[in-house]
Every structure is written in structure tokens, then in C-alpha cells.
Image (cartoon, rainbow, N blue to C red):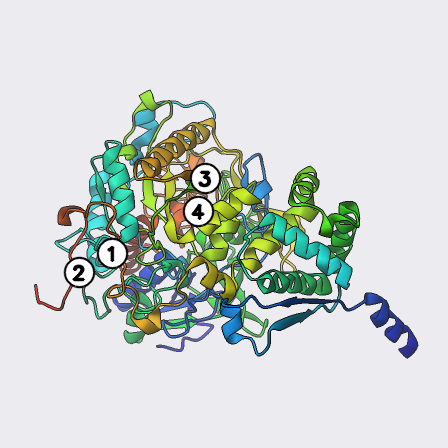
Amino acid sequence: MATISHDDTSVVLIIGSGAGGGTLAHELTRRGIKVVLLEAGARQSIASFSQVPGEAFMQLTWLEPRTTSGSWSVKEDYAALPSWTCKTVGGTTVHWTGATPRARPWEVVNRTTYGKVDGASMIDWPIPYSELLRYYEIAEKRMVVARRNGNPGIPASSHFKVFYNGAKRIGYKQVHTNYMAINTRPADGRAMCMQQGFCVQGCKVGAKWSTLYTEIPRAEATGNLDLRIESRAVRIEHGADGLATGVVYRDAQGREQRQKARIVCVAANSVETSRLLLLSESAKYPQGLANSNDQVGRHYSHHTGGFVFGAFEQPIHFWRGATLAGVVEDETRHDPARGFAGGYHLELAALDLPSIATAGFPQTLWGRDLGYMMDRYSAMAGIFINGEDLPRASNRITLNPNVKDQFGLPVANIHVDDHPNNAAMRAHAQKQAKALLEAAGATRVVMTRQTPATHNMCANRMSADPREGVLNAHGQTHDIRNLFVSDGSAMSTSSSANPTLTIVALALRQAQYIEQQMRTRAI
Amino acid sequence: MNTDMDRRHFIRGTGMLTGTVLAGSALALLAPSRTWAVDLGTLSTTEGAALMAVAGTIAPHDTLAEAAYALTVKAIDAECARDAPTLAMLREGLAQLGTEFATATEATRVRVLTAMESSPFFKFLRYQTLSNLYASPLAYDHFGYEGESFSKGGYLQRGFNDLRWLPDVPLADSGPVFTGATR
């Protein structure tokens, strides 16, 4: 671990240590580039993770205020927590479930494939799928993904047996224990999965890939990383030439600090990345940084999602086993005959006791109907719907001047009016998930509306045309050549895939580009 | 000044919820005596009793220890102590429930709460009830949840795949349990 001077103008400064920022930090430092990595949260470890439901959530979650508006149901159901992200070293790779599907080839050219859809703002990715695939393959090796590169799949849990049999009985063909960045045997200096259950609490044996105990310590070992925890970026500064010069942040004691940099990469997850770009407004950039085309924060996508849980008559014990180790891939296809564009994954899902009641079941469930479901907690199976969200220019992260954080800065507002395509897709997915559970023997099935987004994407998207997005094909802002975005907000469309693998693939690719740009003195 | 503080403390009314431990329950094994008592710092005994009835209507489990509901009410009491607007909202809602609510039949209580389903009062109490009631170790025991598993080596060797009432999954769609043999 290096100690880098605040005045060192040669460094790359990365904001956020999750899938994008943590991976980028490792990739740059191992190439000999000095990196300052700012992380707003504290540093936990596999020893400090809590397996007490509720405690883990409080330990890892970004709990500072955000607001939400628009017609989406989250405004009604989860106004206090419209997005569920992490504030800890490792970011959301600490609480993620390890699911690593790839975006489908047609999903990265969905504007071309789906054609014009009213009220949607789709674009094709500025990266050909063949190239994305190349980086997917590198990322899958790096993360030791089960079912890829000869790695065995996750063993079937009791919960998966229910899911599998139900899926097969209703005719699904592509059903397996999912592509998972979870070790099924010791690998990468990490232990194998012991089927502890509730991966969102953080993996206490480190079998699940997380930048917390893979990329970040490896970056530290190069001697080129200065990780500063509990350090909150509040403003990106620029010079008279318009280029970024560094970042103002608040340290653990709340003191203002200033770090100079040659390059700034923002990887703070879609909501906070957009907020930081907007907070950095100046006389030269009155609309915020990288926002000359009024695109920062737009096209915010969250995945069409929700839970479906079924109560059974015989025991399942769904808390025993890797949480998301199960998937139906059949519905990821684009088939307009189903009444909507794009597709979705059905994924195995279990929730802890308080969470299933507060977030896994519909907000309208109480009384004897709730009692019936909860009394069958030991005999329950669950499904998480994860479908493509069609982007809309008006779905946007903005600043809310009426609500301030502890530093007196406006918080982020998440505005979403779901595209009608989402409702059609959700209805189809709920019908299929219910049929699956009933085919396996469920006596009663309940389902939620949209749950708070853990997948926050596309708000600063890559676009060939600068008028349609914030970034070029390398995550470099169209406006400022030494300012990059390195998280899920760079994705041009959401696809139906859980986003972490794609974020890591893009970070690997971006690191190569940054290194080349620095070497050739283009930046 | 002091008198005023004392008076304020007095009118805040500290309530108490009491009950008897069910023989053979998890609590019976832990509790030092057959009775339990939960102190309330802000709410009165009457308010506590009404909240016990609300929690029992929102999340009815006939054999779940009453003490689990009392601890839920204690958590709600703590929320009220932290936030004055919450206390005011709660008291307004309790007034609407009426004085008979705590002793009314379940059908009546359901009818009263159904009419208030979209109110902040009901939403607050639904969330508080579910997030506290089901987080207690008493609930773990009642619902069969086995708690933290790391110290016991997870479930790999403790039944993660012991379901026998459905056919097994082909290895091609899942994977083998690694037993230590090399590749």
C-alpha cells in the first residue's frame, strides 16, 4: 500500500471500490500506474461480516437519504430506499449474490433488433458484441465463474431441486445452477462455497468473488495503491482548459481534503456517480461535468424485477445454500409474440426472515394471509425476476435541492416512469414463475411489484453519438478527456443480465485504454 | 425547571407489558421465571396493549410466544422516543382505533385496520411489526430458521441438498460436491 501525496498530479484517482472501481484499481496498479482509490464506506472483512439478518444490511448498505419520484411503484413501496446499494470497501460486490450471466448478443444492439419503440430511448452499444465477449471471457477467468472455463457448476440445493423440477414440468429447457462467481472448489487463493446461505450478508469464507478480498489487496500488494476509506468525494475540480484536475473529498473526520490527479474515474454506482457529476457544476460547466448534451443521469435503468414466493407442504429449508444458484434462461430471448420487447431471467432467490416479510412479499400482504405464508417459511421456494428495462430519457437521476446530506449537499432524486413494456414483461414473468412454483407443488404463491434496484445502470451511458449519451466506447466522457465513468452507469442498455460481470468486463477493457492513453501522452 | 422536567417525564407515562411464558416454548428454556415483563419508555400500558393487538392482527401466529410481540412493541416504543412526529402520528392513529380495539375480536380488528390500510399509521406499524417480530430469536425458533451457519461450516455437510420429495437434478445442470480430490 502506497502513501501518495495530495499534490501528486501524476495519479489516476478512482472514486468507488466496487466491481468497476476495484477492478480498475487493480488493473492500473499492476501496470505500474499510481492510483488513489476513494471509498465512502468502511472496510469490513470476512471476519467482521454479520450473519444476523438486519445487522448485515445495516453494516453494508448505503443508508444516506435519497428521494424518488415518478409513477413507478417503488415511490409508494420503498420511498426511503429506492435503490439498494452498498457503502463499504468492495461496494456492491460485498452483498451481491454472485450471478454472472452475459448480456445476450441482440441486447447490445437492441435499437436495431427491437426497432423503434414509442417512449423508449434505446441505442446500440458502441462496442461490437465480439469485443465485449472477449472481455467477458477474461472477466470469467478472473472471477472464477462456475460453469465457465471448465469450472463445475454449483451443486444443486434442495431449493434448486424445487425450482428445477417445476421449470422442467412447465417445459423449460435451459435450467441450471446459474453462472456464478462462487468457488465450487478451492481456487484463486480463496475457499470453496460451504453453502452458508444468504450471500447478501457477505461471504464469510470468501468463496464469492468480491473486490474486497481479490482485486483490492492485490492492488495494494503492487505498492501503487493508496486506498482511502471513509472518504467521500464531493466535487470534481477542473482547470481553465476544462480538464479535470482533482477531487475534493471529506475524510473520516469530515475534514475537507483535496487530491490532485492526472485522470479521474468515477465508479460510485449509477446514482452517486450521476450526483457527483451534477454537484461538480462550475462557471465553465454550469450544468455539471460531462453534461453539455444534458445526458448525465438520463436513461437510468433498474431491471424489471420483483419476487415471487410459493408456500409448499413439505420442507425445503431454502436458507441452506447459495442464494441465487438457479436460473431459467429460456425467457431471455427477444420474442415480440409474448407481447413485449426483450427478455428476462428467472433466478432462484431466498430471503431472511424479516426481509421476506418486508420486501419479498407484496406490501398489501398482512393478517392471516401473511401468517399462512410465514408459517411455511421452512417450506418455501422463491424466484427473482430479472428482465431488461427499456430506457427512457426522462428516467433520470437529478439533484434534489430540498433534501441535503450531512455535508449540506443536495441528495440524489431517482425519477422513474416505467415503460409499458416493463409491465407487460413483469406480468408474463410473474405468470411463468407462478406456474413453475405450482408445478412443483406450491399451495399458494405471492408476488411483489418492483423491488428497490440493486442493479442501477445506464445513467451515464456509452454512445457513438455524443448527443445520446455521456461516454464514448471506452467510458471516457465525450466532454472531458481525462474524466471517465467506470461503473454500471456506463452500460448503453440494461440487458436482462445481472450487471456485475459486464461492469468488470468494461473495467478490464477501460484499464487497457487508459494505460495506452497515458503511455502515448494522449492524456 | 427541574419540576417541569419531572412533570414531563411523568406525563410521558412509562408503560409495561407483562405475560406468562408458554410451557415448552423456546423462551421457557431461557427465561429465569414463568412470567415476563417489558418496560416501555414513552408509551403507556394502554397504548402498548393496543399495539400488541395491532401487531397480532397484522402478523397472526397462534403459537408464537406473546413475548415476541411485546419486544416488537418495545421497538416501536423506542422509535417513538427517537422521533416526536412519529409519536404524534402513532397517537393519532391509536385514537382512531378506539378504546375497544385491544379487546375486540380478530374480525373486528381486521375490519378496523383494513379501513386504515393506506394510512402512514398502518404502513409504519406493518413495517415495524414485520421487521422486528421476525428478526427475533423467538421467531427463528418458531419458523424453524437455523440462524448463522458459518460457525457450523455452512450447510454443505448439514443438509443443503437433503430434499427427497422431488427427483434429483442431473449433474450436467448442477455440479458435484467437491470432496477434495484433485482435478
Q: Position of residue A330 (x, y in %)?
A: 25, 34
Question: How far is mark 2 from mark 4, CA to CA?
Answer: 34 Å
Image-based side of A481 in relation to A504, left or right: right
Above or below: residue A354 compared with residue A419 = below
Residue receiving disc 4: A456
Work out whether residue A104 can be spotted: no
Image-based side of A31 in relation to A413, left or right: left
Q: Residue at x 47, y 27 (%)?
A: A420
Name the chain under label 2. B
Q: Position of residue A427 (x, y in %)?
A: 42, 30
Asked whether the beta carbons under mark 1 and mark 2 sit within 8 Å of each other, the answer is yes
The residue carrying pointer 4 sits among few (fewer than 14), some (14 to 19) or many (20 or more) residues within 10 Å by Cα, namely: many
Dot 3 falls on a residue whose secondary structure is: strand
Name the chain under label 1. B
Q: Nearer the viewer, residue A7 or A90?
A: A90
Asked whether the beta carbons under mark 3 and mark 4 sit within 8 Å of each other, the answer is no
Dot 2 falls on a residue whose secondary structure is: loop
Residue receiving disc 3: A446
Select label 3 or label 2 by which is in front: 3
Tell me which numbered mark, 1 or 2, is placed earlier along the sequence. 1
Q: Amino acid at mark 4?
A: Asn
Q: Quadrant of the C terminus of chain A?
A: bottom left
Image-based side of B10 in relation to A458, left or right: right
Tell me which numbered mark, 3 or 4, is placed earlier along the sequence. 3
State how many labels appear: 4
Mark linked to residue B161: 1
Dot 1 falls on a residue whose secondary structure is: loop
Mark linked to residue B177: 2
The residue carrying pointer 3 sits among few (fewer than 14), some (14 to 19) or many (20 or more) residues within 10 Å by Cα, namely: some
